[in-house]
Amino acid sequence: MTPLLDQEVASRVLSRALANGGRFAEVFAERRRGQVLAIDEQRIESVQTGAEEGAGVRVVEGGTTYFAHVDGLDPADLERAADEAAAALKGDRREPQPLQARETTPLPIAHRPEEVPAARKAEMLRELDERGRAKGSEIAQLTASYAEARREVALANSDGLFTGDDRTRVRIGAQVVARRDGSVETGAETLGAHRGYELLEDDPAQIAEQAAAKALTLLDAVPAPSGSMPVVVGGGFGGVLFHEMTGHGLEADHIQKGASVYLHKLGERVAEPLLNAYDDGRLPGEWGSDGIDDEGQPTQKTLVIEEGRITSYLYDHLTAERAGVSSTGNGRRESFRHLPIPRMTNTYIAPGEATPEEMIAEVARGFYAVSFGGGQVDPATGDFVFGVNEGYLIEGGKVTKPCRGATLIGNCLDALAAIDAVGDDFFMKTGMCGKGGQKIPVGTGQGHVRLRALTVGGTER
Amino acid sequence: MSELSAVAHCAVEAATGAGASDAEAYVSRESGREVRVHGGEVESLTAAVQTGVGIRAWSGHRVGYAYGTDLSEAGVTEIAARAAEAAEVADEDEFAAPPQPAEIEALPGLGDPSVAEWEASQLAELALTVERTALDSDPRLVGVEQAVYADAAEQVAIASSTGVAGEHETSTCYAYLQALAEGEGARETGLGFGLARGPRGLDPEAIGAEGAERALEMIGAGKPESRSCPVVLDATVAASFVGLVGGGLGAKAVQRGRSPLAGRLDEEVASAAFALHDDGREPSGPASAPFDGEGVPRRRTALIEGGRLRSYLYDTYTANREGVHSTGAASRGSYRALPSVSTSNLVVAPGSHSFEELLAEAGEGVFVNDVAGLHSGVNPVTGVFSVGASGRMIRGGQLAEPVREFTIAGELVAMLSAVSAAGAEPRWVPFGGSVSTPPLLIAGMAISGS
């Protein structure tokens, strides 16, 4: 396998990119490989592999970024991209700084997934299928999937940086449909990491059992309640609540466009002192971790909320430059076909002191949202919404009936201020986050968290 | 034969040479531009070219797939070998078989030369006009988070060992903005957008004005009280729900029991006021093409008529399972994706009510202008949904104060049965796939607010 980006070629490409001026230029080269398998109706299907390579070149001048991307990594492909990016500029040639190679240590991969025979991955999916279906005769459907992806990236910029990273992620998922008489319910679970096949050496099939258990539980569900009430949010993927209601609003592009409710809130108190939160792109093996971000900046642990006060926004290269600060290593891109923008990595609420049992015991009537299907926020208004895929009523300090069809809705600042307990049972889960048409892997995490009041939108009449 | 078709034929030969009993290759070349503007300046200008091939290989009744960007002979040969190899890992499925060739009728007019002809500076001016129109509309319109223009011109070629062969060219473009209005101590956002085959088909002033109007009308929004009441869905919102219905009409979801519409053929699933068809050849439809993702001719398929479910949508595989013909509904997002059954252009039949008449008929209710959280708030298997919404109260048959931070909840089939009138003015909307729909009046829905 040839190296992604030759240093001499990179220098030449950067020179061409600055042929008509520009204060910054960058070439980003990438090779992507992946394999996907699925099981459905107890048959292995959708076996597919992909191999793509290409590069994106950007030139920045004034407030404008000129960007071009091409498929292919031949020097001629890269030069074409550089010429295309430079075409709309009208200034005088500039010379890039000489390149200095900087080593990056990629996250360690113990067992390269591409070296595992596909037949073994198929066997693993068959075990998921069997174990999930064994949870009961009411399991009507089970689908499970396996996906591995490797992204080798190399980049060089006109400030003289020349570096790269090698990233491998593995993720499996199980979706279950359970039926009883007329009612149909679903359950899903995933497991993923920035790791190799070693992720699946433990007992991957338990996710199928967990998905099955969720669907079976929901067969006894009642319609979700409606109205404002105390809400206890589960650990792990419950952290998507913080991701949506705070994380996005801290991304510096939203801030700089005045499109965030966290504008002018740096140093301000927005939550109870019990709240501390981080974005951490260096957590070992986590789904949202990388060695460097997609602009070559080493990833880092950034404290974003300290004892209820906002302590930092999340920056990429350009937004940091504009704000006169350093990048926080949050410049991420889906692929060489996309421009980097400020994005979260692994975002989480740090563990607190309460136990989940205590939090629930103090609620006379409320809602317990164990996990979400996902969420969405408008950072400008702060309005958010979350679909709950496993939720329960809390009555008299106890978790009682499972509920179907619940959505949580609210406004970021109100909801953040309403957090009155943070649990000690911290863990992380994986998610895919969409922004500006780019989908990237992110981690979310927390222990149980309680909000004094939040609107639950259910179907109960 | 075009260069792309030559690559497709070469790929098919390479796959059968690598041991596949049958093979199909889908090759695409797409060039596109995007301009993002902010604060009267161009924020980014992107030029992109993408080329790739996806090869489906059959080994008897087992299927494998591989894709890649290397279209050289050596590159295609390697991708073909991986596809043939992948087929050996899949399980036997007696219905998995390559499509047979059928006559493909040409569909001219899917490409607009202005996509290629317009200079980057003209595209930038278009996007800047979108932004400026919004900013100039009202002093309370304090900003535009982003105004964007983007286009794509795509050439596709397909070939298979069974004799399928086709080529087509399409172009699409869109512009949108997210406008920010401020008032009564809060910020509001408003989306405006337009779709066309080329930039000359877009009206930047109308797009800017729509975003501004949607943001401005939300100033002072409060939470509505929880209730069950008539709801008018704006076309953009109706389209999202119609897209979910379309997802449930795909034969794969139906056959595998993962659709609220499974087993309902010929049954009453909607009120008579709601009629729906899919038309992959509709000249104005953004998703139109002469053939689908596996080379089967696109066509019109009636889905819901007279309140009854008339047909599901089939690709070759799902049709084989039921011994019927494909409806030409195999779609693929790109060469990276296996073809799978999905809608093309979903079209809701317009009714006779003007927007004002829909409001008048609703009397006391809510006009829903925007929904959020569709990807997490809807269960596609059961059709149960609860999503975030914003819009205006309807009082005395007229639009009244703005409302936000509430949810609308229900179940898809029940909602279709409760459609009491369709508006007279349809619109193409890029949410929920490619959907043309007028606003819809729903007789009753659960609103959860304060």
Image (spheres, rainbow, N blue to C red):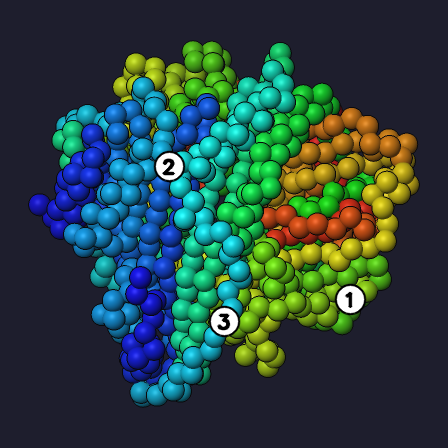
Q: Residues within 10 Å of mark 3 (few under 14, many from 20)?
A: some
- Tag 3: amino acid: Thr
Chain letter for the residue marked with disc 1 in the picture: A
The quarter holding residue B363 reads top right
User: How far separated are the C-alphas under marks 2 and 3?
Assistant: 33 Å
- Tell how many labels: 3
Mark 2 surroundings: few (<14), some (14-19) or many (≥20) residues within 10 A: many
For the residues beneath circles 1 and 2, the answer to whether they share a chain is yes
Residue beneath the point at 46% across and 23% down: A41
**Viewer-nearest of discs 1 and 3:** 3
Residue highlighted by disc 3: A104
**Is residue A33 rendered to the left or right of residue A81?**
right
Residue placed most toward the observer, A79 or A32? A32
Dot 2 or dot 3, earlier in sequence? 2
Q: Amino acid at mark 1?
A: Glu
The quarter of the rendered structure image containing the C terminus of chain A is top right
